[in-house]
């Protein structure tokens, strides 16, 4: 074990977490400052070009990895504040049409309503004529808890295990949920 790793192992958990957070914040600020000063390139996050959504992706990462640590140490999982959940879920859901195309599963997006329930949840209409009322007219509907949806996006819940309601084109809804996980780590 290296000297730095040994020092962190001997330190109280709060010190290790604080040092890790400071290092992560420094790297994020440095990346965005360099991009802002040149305006020639977009910052990359895990090989994908991002704009300010990189900060949302980082939020997903920090929350998911924090919950990984809480699971491993027998602590209760964290629930982000409603505003954070709204930002993370909206960024994810509104990106689904692009992610579905990138996934290359051959699914065609038809009118789909995504309803995320709970504090921080919202309703999103996707696809052509997305404002169509879901139901017997052939539109698709996905209803799920916003926290569980965000855990799915972070690859902590499998698409088939996401509790909620799914009506309409089951293959499309499954493809959307798989696509939601494309950039998770």
Image (cartoon, rainbow, N blue to C red):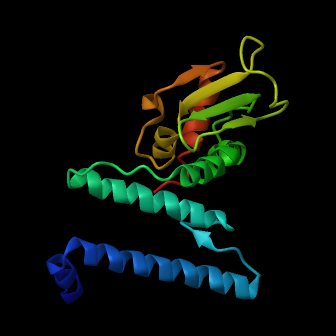
182 with respect to 104 (left or right): left
Extreme-top residue of the structure: 136
* Residue depicted at 74% across the width and 34% down the height: 125
Quadrant housing residue 22: bottom left
Q: Residue furthest right?
A: 129
Q: Position of residue 62 (x, y in %)?
A: 43, 62
Q: Residue at x 58, y 28 (%)?
A: 143
Q: Position of residue 158 (x, y in %)?
A: 43, 37
- Count the marks: how many? 0
Q: Quarter holding the N terminus?
A: bottom left
Is 117 located above or below residue 74 in the figure? above
- Measuring from the top left, give residue 11's x and y in whole percent: 18, 79
The reply, left or right, for residue 85 in relation to residue 17 is right
Viewer-proximal residue, 129 or 172?
129
What residue lies at 77% left-to-right and 28% top-to-bottom?
111
In the drawing, does residue 39 fall left or right of residue 151?
right
54 sits to left or right of 38: left
Determine the residue positioned at 60% across, 49% down. 86
The one nearer the camera, 12 or 185, is 12
Res 169 → quadrant: top right
24 lies above or below 87: below
Asked which quadrant contains residue 185, the reply is bottom left
Question: Percent position (x, y) of residue 20?
Answer: 36, 76
Decide which of 83, 171 is in the foreground and name it: 83
């Amino acid at each position: 074990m290296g000297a730095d790793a040994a020092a962190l192992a001997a330190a109280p958990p709060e010190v290790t977490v604080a040092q890790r957070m400071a290092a992560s914040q420094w790297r994020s600020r440095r990346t965005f400052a360099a991009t802002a000063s040149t305006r020639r390139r977009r910052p990359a996050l895990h090989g994908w070009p991002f704009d300010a959504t990189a900060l949302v992706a980082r939020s997903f990462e920090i929350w998911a990895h924090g919950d990984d640590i809480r699971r491993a140490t027998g602590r209760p999982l964290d629930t982000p504040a409603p505003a954070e959940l709204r930002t993370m879920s909206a960024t994810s859901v509104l990106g689904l049409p692009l992610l579905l195309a990138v996934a290359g599963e051959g699914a065609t997006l038809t009118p789909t309503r995504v309803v995320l329930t709970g504090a921080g949840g919202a309703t999103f209409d996707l696809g052509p004529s997305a404002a169509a009322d879901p139901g017997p007219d052939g539109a698709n509907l996905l209803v799920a808890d916003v926290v569980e949806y965000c855990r799915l996006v972070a690859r902590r819940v499998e698409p088939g295990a996401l509790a909620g309601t799914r009506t309409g084109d089951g293959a499309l809804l499954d493809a959307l949920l798989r696509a939601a996980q494309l950039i998770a780590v």
